[in-house]
Amino acid sequence: MGEERSCLIYKLIQPLQLRESYTSGCATQNVCNGNTSLNFLNWPHSSDSVSCRTVSETPDLTPGHAIFCHICNSYNGDSCVGQLHQCSEEDDTCLYEKMKIIHERAEETEDIRRCGKSRECGRVGRIQSSRKTILINTTCCDHSGCHTPMPTLPSINNDENGVICPACFVPNADRCASYDNLKCTGKEKRCVRYMRTEKRVRDTLHGCTTDEICEAGSSVVHLPGRYYKSVINNISCTNAAPWRNTAPPLFMVTVTTLSVFKVEF
């Protein structure tokens, strides 16, 4: 973090205790200068040594090498800084996702820093159903140890745009039993089927969304270590249909009355 641009290996030898110990991690340049000793520790009858390797700021695109990204997960405004973690070879960028989930008048925000794929960088917009709404924005940076800018949530536009989608939300299930007709708003002109699976619990949502969320596609969120989290987000989209006012038209009805008179002669 911060100015720590070097990887350090520190060796401490304590002959009286017949002990050798090693420590490795991140370090600032002033610790690594000289790469000889951390004399300020001043262990009696002991010796120590330091070796450092500078971490390149340039992304290593050689096959078999992966970038390092900050990993963290926080809720409702808590800080999300995290420690560096080596990504898998399939991931080529560092992501910062901010989400706001609105369900039955309750709101929750979530911040995630993680490894990801470049196509996910444009994931921004809203997924809206009849019962649940998800706002999301994603920022990226593409080299080891980079600090991804904090994203801001997109603004909400509730102006109807003339298209309609089937909508539902059902927790702990993979399909909806019934659907509502939802009039889409703003830039949301695609119909989405969104399934989130976490700890074997699957939630399903149908509704309206933006092109950007559809194009970013599905994702797998894997946060190792203290922030352990494993989530599968499946997203599939179709074009929304135009909606029309289906109320019956008003007609002027003419009623003809036939009167029958009985005439006696």
Image (cartoon, rainbow, N blue to C red):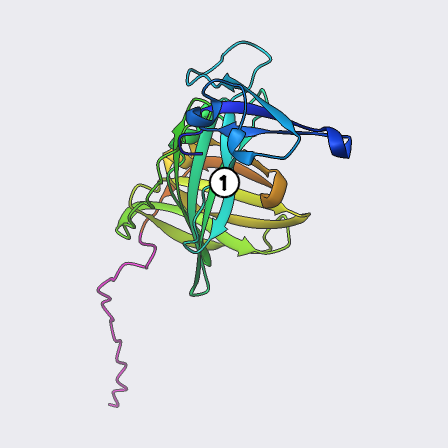
Residue at horizontal 46 percent and vertical 64 percent from the top: 104
Classed neighbour count for the residue bearing mark 1: other residues with Cα under 10 Å, few (<14), some (14–19), many (≥20):
some
Question: Per the image, is 264 magenta?
Answer: yes
Query: In the displayed structure, does residue 210 sit left or right of residue 196?
Result: left
Q: Secondary structure at mark 1?
A: loop
Query: In the displayed structure, does residue 54 sit left or right of residue 259?
Result: right
Q: Could one spot residue 99 in this view of the protein?
A: yes
Q: Main secondary structure of the magenta part?
A: loop
Q: Could one spot residue 115 in this view of the protein?
A: no
Residue 194: where, in percent of width, then height?
Answer: 52, 43
Above/below status of 263 relative to 166: below
The residue at the far top in this view is 62
Residue at horizontal 61 percent and vertical 35 percent from the top: 43
Residue 245: where, in percent of width, then height?
Answer: 31, 54
Residue 214: where, in percent of width, then height?
Answer: 44, 34
Q: What span is in magenta? A: 245-265
State the residue position of label 1. 82
Front residue (pair 96, 42): 42
User: As shown in the figure, which amino acid type bears the numbered disc 1?
Assistant: Gly
Residue 220: where, in percent of width, then height?
Answer: 57, 35
Question: Per the image, is 109 magenta?
Answer: no
